[in-house]
Amino acid sequence: QSMQLSNFTGKTVAIMVASGFDEDMFIAIQRAMMSVNAKLRVISRDAGLTNAWNGSGWGMSYPVDSTLSTTLAVDYDALIIPSGERHVTTLEAEAHAKRLVRAFTREDMPVLALGEARALLEMVDIAIPQSDAETGVGVEGRLAIGTTENFMAGLEALNQAMVVDDGESVAA
């Protein structure tokens, strides 16, 4: 697994959440980032702690590294927005969440929206990439989308987006 995510090594990755994000996915992303020595930073509208959703009820609480209102895209190398209906609904009503999504995409920084999180892209008028029927992954430049079920494929697509440099094409 770490081979496929090697472009994250040494990078600082923001994971944007509000209470109600998918806990299993969050933990898996956390593990994946740790395995390649990337710094995963939790940015949330909640200060202090934010609550995960685990299937049918509330899960664990996780420490927040930075609040949405104080977060700047320039401080990170990539943005991941995990799935979770509750947290996406909350973020949709959050002006700072929209500001951040716009900032990351405007600066052409790698962004991955998983599951319901693609609704946040639509809200700020960002075209959703066409997704592959098999993997559920869609990529347009440095913007990637993925499904809840196959989010690791989404992470791999984001890993690819990390290497796209000034006009250089990356072999598929």
Image: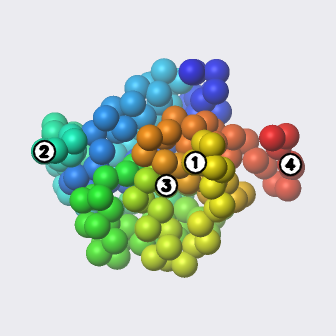
Nearest the viewer among 70 and 87 is 87
Q: Please name the residue shown 34% across and 71% down the image.
A: 92
Sequence-first disc among 1 and 3: 3
Q: Which residue is the site of mark 3?
A: 113
* Element on which disc 1 rests: loop
Circle 2 — which element?
Answer: strand
Q: Position of residue 60 (x, y in %)?
A: 16, 37
The residue tagged with tag 3: helix, strand or loop?
strand
Report the amino acid beneath label 1. Gly
**Is residue 169 depicted above or below 97 in this figure?**
above
- Of pointers 1 and 2, the one earlier in the residue sequence: 2
Which tag is nearer the camera, tag 2 or tag 3? 2
Residue receiving disc 2: 57
Q: CA distance from mark 4 to mark 2?
A: 44 Å
* Separation (CA) of disc 3 from disc 4: 22 Å
The answer to which image quadrant residue 4 occupies is: top right
Mark number displayed over residue 169: 4
Looking at the image, what colour scheme do you see?
A: rainbow
For the C terminus, which image quadrant?
Answer: top right
Which circle's residue, 4 or 2, is located before the other in the chain?
A: 2
Closer to the eye: label 3 or 4: 3
* Number of marks in picture: 4
State the CA–CA distance, disc 1 to disc 2.
26 Å
CB atoms of marks 4 and 1 within 8 Å: no
